[in-house]
Amino acid sequence: MNDNSQVRDVYDAVADPTRRKLLQILADVDELPLYEITVHFEMGRTAVSKHLSILKDADLVVARKVGRETRYRLNANPLKEIRDWVSFYEGFWKERIDKLKLLLEEE
Amino acid sequence: MNDNSQVRDVYDAVADPTRRKLLQILADVDELPLYEITVHFEMGRTAVSKHLSILKDADLVVARKVGRETRYRLNANPLKEIRDWVSFYEGFWKERIDKLKLLLEEE
DNA sequence: ATTATAAGACACCAAAAGGTGTCGTGTCAA
DNA sequence: TTGACACGACACCTTTTGGTGTCTTATAAT
């Protein structure tokens, strides 16, 4: 599960529902330590920690040590890549809607 | 690799770079049979076929039998879900830009 | 009628993913 | 200064993933 390859693909990081939930939780607050994040899930601390480190590898999350705890913070910037990618396909579903309209008008 | 669970998560389907390349190839043409798609990749026909069936499970691709070949066609509609999801986070990177602007103006 | 092609359906395999539990270390509190 | 806590680092396990090759069937071409 863990990957040393420093930079992880943002699509891959976001593919897991647990990790999307993590991003959402972090979107609501400034920063949060691991033990507080863990209570939102039905899995152990270690698992959540691993998911966070995957998000960290994708630069979607920034970790900061404060005393004995590690606070995690959202960094949404890498999501731009997904936004740009998906916007390319926007034309394709709009096109289909136009075709549908044409069909309806013909009748 | 194959999954019978009919409906596959669109995030998951799109996480693989091979499958994103497949979508891009299908975006350029109307429809394409498997053996023509395969030449774009450095893997066997079976592997490409499996990727296509994963995309099909996510409804990102529609298959249509014509004679002895199966023609594949793009269906971009399920990508709306990703677009909606990612647009939620748009505010977060815009926010960061605003903060940067403020910092620059202060100087 | 025979041969070649397209592709689905398997069986199979190595590697990665997603969990678990345990141990060790640094930090805070009593 | 002695516990309790936070959490990283492992070792470990099972399931999924992404590829392979082979077999079979349906269709097309000669």
Image: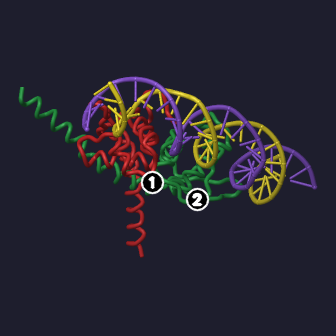
Chain colours: A red, B green, C purple, D yellow
What is the number of the mark on residue B76?
1
Q: Residues within 10 Å of mark 2 (few under 14, many from 20)?
A: few
Q: Nearer the viewer, residue B42 or D2?
A: D2
In percent of width and height, residue D26 lies at: 76, 60
Rendered location of residue B15, percent (x, y): 48, 43
- Relative side of A44 to C6, left or right: left
Any mark on residue B5, and which? 2
Q: Amino acid at mark 1?
A: Ala
| Residue C2 placement, left or right of B2 | right
Q: Residues within 10 Å of mark 1 (few under 14, many from 20)?
A: many
Instruction: Judge left or right: residue B59 versus residue C11.
Output: left
Local SS, label 1: loop
Viewer-side residue, A27 vs A35: A35
Q: Where on the picture, by quarter, is residue A80?
A: top left
Query: Residue C24 location in percent, x, y?
Result: 46, 25
Whether residue B36 is visible to the viewer of this picture, yes or no, is no
Q: Amino acid at mark 2?
A: Ser
Q: Position of residue A23 (x, y in %)?
A: 34, 45
Q: Which residue lies at the image location 32% right of the left edge and 34% below the top edge?
A: A70
